[in-house]
Structure formats: C-alpha cells, structure tokens
Image (cartoon, rainbow, N blue to C red):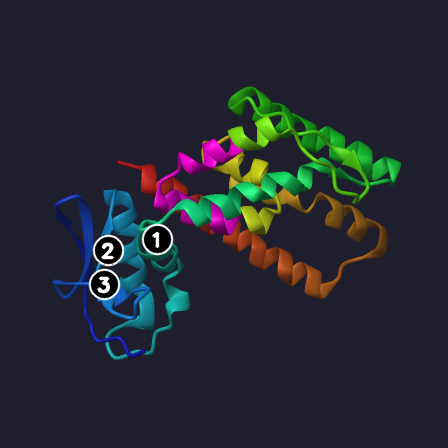
Amino acid sequence: MKRFWDRADYAEVPGGFAITLDGKPLRLPGVDGRAAGFTLPSRPLAEAVAGEWQQAGSGKGGEMSLDEVPLTRLAGTGLDRIAPDPGPTVEAIARYAETDLLCYRAEDRRLAALEAADWDPILDWCAACHGARLHPTSGIAYRRQDPEALERLHGVVAQHSPLELSALGLAVPALGSLVLGLALSAGALDPVAAHRLSILDETYQEALWGEDAEALARRERLAADVALSARLLFLARAH
C-alpha cells in the first residue's frame, strides 16, 4: 500500500476520537468488506494510533504495510469484529481456564518447585481477586476444574469492553493462561513478568540443554504480542 497522506492526526467526535489522514477520517476494511471508520474511546489511544499512521511508510509516497500499525489492527478487531457480538470471543477466551497453563505442573521435582514458587501466588491472586480458585495437577492429564470457578472467570472476561477483549484475545493464547491474561488486564502483572511466567518451563529446559533459535524467535514474537495487548489495555482506559 502506498502512503498517500502527509499528516495523520485525530479529532474529537461524538463518542470519542476519530483518526484523520490529511483531515479526512481513516477508514479500514470491515468484516463485510466495506470501508468503515472507527471511533476510539480515549485521547491517549487516538494519539498512539495516529502516531502509527504518521510513521508508516516513512513519508508520503512510501510503501507501507499494515504490520506497521499493529495497535490500529488490534483496536480495529475489537471495534469491527468483536463489538457487534462479543459472546463468541468471551467464550473462546474464558475456555482457557479449563486447561490453564498455571495448573499443569512438571513431574520433574526441581521444575515443579520453581512452578509452585512462581505460579501459586498468581493462582492465589486469582482466588482472592475474583473468587475463583483453580487447582494444579502434576503431569499433562486433564484435570476438571470447579464449575463455579470457571463460571466466575467467564463473568470476569465478559465484563471487558470490546477493545479489552481484543487485547485479551491476543494475550491469553500467547500466554497459554487466562489467569495470567487477567492479571495483565488488572495491572497485577506487567507484560514482561506475565511473559516470563508463561515460559518458565522453556527457560528451565533451555538452561539444561542450551538455546534453540526457533524457540527463541517464537518467544520473542509472543512477548511482542503480550506487550501490544498490554499497551492497548492501558491506552483504552487512559484519559
């Protein structure tokens, strides 16, 4: 896509803030294929999205990719795809609690001890903050969690706005854990800490057997996803 604008900015409109390119509202392809504008709920988020478009393509006439506007894409997913019907997204995110990473512990005693030291406090936080206690098990065999706890966590997810659900929809799969995703959303963990906890097993094995280039690249991609999710969560709530 060739950049056709000189200046990206934002303007206050009824219900929030719109992104403008040379004074004209930014419009992106919608679910139905039609171009659609979107209104962002906070000035800081609008500033950040406008900043992406100002930097994209390195000036008018340059080639740009939507990879240069990740915040725009994630926010657009929330407003265009999730907002009309949040239910399926809520269901998909909440389902991660049934097999949450933090509940499946290694059989290796040393690793299991590290997992308990790092993961148990987050499960305790979840129980204290949301009234939902998830129970760990050893090995990979499925353990059924308390239905009441799962229902409570479903309710917590459902309280998130479409933009927040878009962020969680990226972060939770990247972390393999609804509990870590909710801790990120609540500000109980920053993105670096959340990602570190999610790769505890990998880094333990890496310390024993050495680095794997493909695994490292994958972790870097997932860390970037978690960081982007946290950024959207913060900016969507800022004033």
- Quarter of the figure with the C terminus: top left
Tell me, yes or no, whether the two marked residues, 2 and 1, touch with CB atoms within 8 Å: yes
**In whole angstroms, how far apart are the C-alphas of marks 2 and 1?**
9 Å
Residue 121 is situated, as x and y percent measured from the top left of the image, at 65, 26
Looking at the rendered structure, the secondary structure element under dot 3 is strand
Q: Residues within 10 Å of mark 3 (few under 14, many from 20)?
A: some
Please give the residue where the numbered disc 3 appears in the rendered image: 36
Coordinates of residue 144 in the picture (x, y in percent):
70, 35
Which residues fall within the magenta stretch? 153-171
Of pointers 1 and 3, the one earlier in the residue sequence: 3
Residue at the image point whose x is 57% and y is 59% from the top? 221
Q: Is residue 197 above or below residue 29?
A: above
Residue highlighted by disc 2: 38
Q: Secondary structure at mark 2?
A: loop
Choose between 177 and 215: the one closer to the eye.
177
| Residue 192 appearing in the image | no
Task: Name the residue type under label 1.
Answer: Ala
Residue 152, horizontal then vertical, whole percent? 52, 28
Contact, CB < 8 Å: mark 3 with mark 2?
yes
Q: Give the x, y percent position of residue 51.
A: 29, 57
Marks 1/3: CA–CA distance: 13 Å
Question: Within 10 Å of the Cα at label 1, are there few (<14), some (14-19), or many (20+) other Cα atoms?
Answer: many
Residue at position x 68%, y 47% in the image: 199
Q: Which residue is mark 1?
A: 75
Kind of residue at disc 2: Phe
